[in-house]
Image (cartoon, coloured by chain):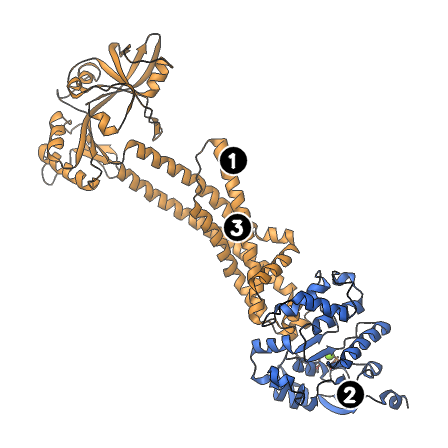
Chain colours: A blue, B orange
């Protein structure tokens, strides 16, 4: 699994004819209706689309929180349909870093302990989780706030802690579902610049957003509508085109 | 996750809500505490009784004239022929495993020494009584076999009588009046203490023959001995000796094959047996009371753990999203429940021991806390945690991470 991950030629995410439907009583809701794409190492992808189009559903599957109804999804070369519950948890732990709209930090728990949390579930246990967590907090610019609890941090700072937590176990990709949805525009920009910096260092980032100028910080844009990908294009020139 | 991390996480979670944690464990605290107190008091009482019985002698048989009914009480007294020196001799000569045999007749008497007087029990007894009762002297000597069958007016007095009549001075050689008959004190017995709520040292011994003629009033036959006390060799099985003795006595006293004994043999092993039966009933009661309170406590734990799982659904979802396996979540909540119960158990234990100590000092009751009950209390609390924590913990571990993350 790790050997496959180390191979640059294997896409980090490879989806083929992905569908997901929910059964609500008699009625079936088709959240995804046949989605195929590949995301490679070092990409920065924005996923856009109207509400209810299936963006979160897609992200949950890429994040190994959910399995597709049909089709094939490989994360780092591993078909997630072949994994059981615990193996999916393992994959989430060492391959994926999540960033949520609502930060989802543990309340009354210091930034440092929040960042360390994924390492307590890591197998094998890292030798020095404390040092790894400190390093990540410094990387997101919170070296001086390690002992603060979430209620003592601003929204942007909390999201940085969440990003440090996502990074702490050296994942293959960062998944962010509307990471700036709860932040004002100035703070959003800080977070987006942080993602850009991470991407510049080689990290693969996939981000869901509603806003075009948020998406414009990415390198590639996937537009989703009614559970299907309707556009797949580079971000370059996006703002200029939409302005016209 | 390692056990240490489970413990750390559980400690943090429990400390968040100290008051709630304590209230939750109240059932367990009360359950464990009351069990400790009850067993401490019960244990103290039964140990005291055991010591008393040991001081009476467990290898001793007492034979009464008359039959014995099922409950162990004597009945049908009047019709039965009295026990005599002949019975005593038959036992000594024909029953194996008998170390010493003594006759004994009791009466109460007023004793006067100078200006002091004291009402006590006079026991007319053979010289062998000292062997049978295993009773050393603190001063003087005991009368011998020849003196015992003489009519000499000599007495050996118990420690309580000595204290009441003579205070600190040495009574040996002085003369006392027993029911107005003068007796010379030749010895003082060592103190034996209480037994069965009676002071064993409140007694004086006089030769059996002297007692018959001077102190016992009407004697039915000239060689009547009242009761017979038998000391059995430690090597011999008490029950076997008793059976043998009953056979010899039936034969000597010509009891027909299908008739009831016209005498009764009592041994302390029997008393011990009935006592341990009552104790078994008591501990059964105690155990069921404990079980009920622990179950009630456990339900409280389960309830609060279910509430806690619901409250922390988002946290569980988050932990799962960043890689917690089902077992990690199960372990986390199970550890919390067990820790909660153990804390309750320890508080209950401390409280129980404290109350026992206070009770023992206020009421002067003997208390005894066995290490076994402490282990059982701790183990039972932990078990309650596992049993009643399992359902909530399992529910937490089976949550769907996406739904848990979305939970409001
Ligand atoms: N657990 C579920 N049960 C039933 N239907 C669901 C479930 N989750 C999502 N859906 C449906 O699937 C569709 C896609 O939902 P999804 O959350 O992926 O949309 P989204 O693009 O993320 O929308 P938003 O921009 O509002 O977050 C919606 O119609 C939604 O109602
Ligand atoms: Mg969404």
User: Are callouts 3 and 2 both on one chain?
Assistant: no
In the figure, residue B365 lies in which quadrant?
Answer: top left
Q: Secondary structure at mark 1?
A: helix
- Residue A24 is situated, as x and y percent measured from the top left of the image, at 63, 81
Image mark 2: chain = A
Q: Nearer the viewer, residue B57 or B131?
A: B131
Question: Quadrant for ligand 1?
Answer: bottom right
Residue picked out by circle 3? B345
Q: Are marks 3 and 2 in contact (CB under 8 Å)?
A: no
SS of the residue at dot 2? strand
Residue B192 image-quadrant placement: top left
In front of the other: A179 or A32: A179
Residue to which mark 1 is pinned:
B358
Judge the density around disc 3: few (<14), some (14-19), many (≥20) Cα neighbours within 10 Å.
Answer: many
Residue for badge 2: A220
Question: Which one is in front in this view, the residue at disc 3 or the one at disc 2?
Answer: 2
Mark 3 and 1 residues: CB-CB less than 8 Å, in contact?
Answer: no
Would residue A143 be visible to someone looking at this image? yes
Measuring 22% from the left and 29% from the top, which residue is drawn there?
A: B132
Label 1 residue near ligand 1, CB within 8 Å: no
Q: In whole angstroms, how far apart are the C-alphas of marks 3 and 1?
A: 20 Å
Report whether the residue tagged 3 is closer than 8 Å to ligand 1.
no
Same-chain status of marks 3 and 1: yes
Rendered residue at 16%/40% (across/down): B243
């Amino acid at each position: 699994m790790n050997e496959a991950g180390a191979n640059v030629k294997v896409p980090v995410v490879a989806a083929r004819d992905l569908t997901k439907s929910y059964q609500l009583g008699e009625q079936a809701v088709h959240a995804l209706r046949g989605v195929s794409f590949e995301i490679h190492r070092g990409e920065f992808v924005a996923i856009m689309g109207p509400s209810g189009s299936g963006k979160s559903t897609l992200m949950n599957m890429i994040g190994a929180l959910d399995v597709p109804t049909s089709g094939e999804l490989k994360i780092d070369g591993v078909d997630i349909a072949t994994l059981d519950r615990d193996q999916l948890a393992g994959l989430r732990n060492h391959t994926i870093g999540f960033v949520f709209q609502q930060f989802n930090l543990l309340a009354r728990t210091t930034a440092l302990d929040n960042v360390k949390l994924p390492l307590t579930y890591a197998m094998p246990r890292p030798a020095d989780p404390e040092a790894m967590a400190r390093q990540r907090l410094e990387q997101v610019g919170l070296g001086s706030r390690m002992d603060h609890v979430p209620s003592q941090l601003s929204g942007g700072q909390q999201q940085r802690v969440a990003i440090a937590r996502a990074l702490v176990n050296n994942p293959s990709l960062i998944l962010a579902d509307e990471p700036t949805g709860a932040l004002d525009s100035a703070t959003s920009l800080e977070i987006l610049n942080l993602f850009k910096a991470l991407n510049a260092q080689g990290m693969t980032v996939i981000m869901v957003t509603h806003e075009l100028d948020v998406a414009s910080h990415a390198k590639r844009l996937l537009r989703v509508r009614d559970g299907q990908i309707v556009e797949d294009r580079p971000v370059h020139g996006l703002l200029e085109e939409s302005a016209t | 996750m390692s056990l240490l991390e489970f413990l750390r996480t559980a400690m943090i979670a429990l400390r968040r809500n100290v008051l709630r944690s304590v209230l939750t464990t109240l059932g367990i605290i009360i359950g464990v505490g009351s069990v400790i107190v009850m067993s401490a008091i019960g244990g103290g009482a039964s140990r005291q009784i055991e010591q008393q019985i040991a001081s009476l002698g467990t290898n001793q048989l007492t034979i009464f004239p008359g039959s014995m009914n099922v409950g162990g009480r004597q009945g049908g007294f009047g019709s039965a022929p009295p026990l005599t020196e002949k019975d005593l001799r038959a036992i000594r000569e024909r029953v194996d495993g008998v170390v010493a045999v003594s006759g004994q007749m009791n009466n109460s008497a007023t004793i006067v020494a100078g200006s002091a007087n004291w009402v006590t029990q006079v026991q007319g007894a053979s010289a062998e009584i000292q062997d049978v009762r295993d009773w050393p002297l603190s001063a003087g000597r005991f009368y011998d076999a020849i003196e015992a069958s003489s009519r000499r007016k000599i007495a050996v007095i118990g420690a309580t009588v000595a204290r009441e009549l003579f205070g600190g001075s040495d009574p040996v050689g002085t003369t006392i009046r027993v029911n107005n008959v003068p007796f010379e004190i030749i010895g003082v017995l060592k103190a034996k203490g209480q037994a069965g709520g009676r002071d064993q040292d409140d007694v004086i011994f006089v030769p059996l023959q002297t007692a018959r003629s001077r102190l016992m009033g009407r004697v039915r036959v000239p060689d009547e001995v009242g009761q017979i006390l038998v000391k059995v060799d430690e090597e011999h099985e008490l029950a076997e000796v008793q059976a043998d003795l009953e056979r010899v006595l039936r034969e000597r006293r010509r009891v027909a094959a299908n008739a009831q004994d016209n005498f009764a043999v009592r041994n302390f092993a029997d008393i011990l047996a009935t006592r341990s039966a009552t104790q078994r009933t008591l501990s059964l009661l105690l155990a069921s009371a404990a079980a009920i309170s622990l179950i009630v406590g456990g339900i409280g734990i389960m309830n609060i753990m279910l509430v806690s799982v619901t409250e922390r659904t988002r946290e569980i979802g988050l932990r799962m999203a960043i890689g917690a396996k089902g077992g990690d979540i199960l372990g986390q909540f199970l550890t919390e429940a067990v820790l909660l119960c153990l804390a309750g158990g320890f508080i209950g234990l401390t409280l129980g021991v404290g109350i026992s100590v206070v009770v023992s000092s206020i009421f002067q009751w003997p208390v005894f806390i066995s290490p076994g009950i402490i282990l059982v209390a701790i183990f039972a609390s932990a078990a309650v945690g596992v049993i009643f924590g399992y359902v909530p913990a399992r529910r937490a571990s089976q949550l769907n991470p996406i739904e848990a993350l979305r939970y409001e």
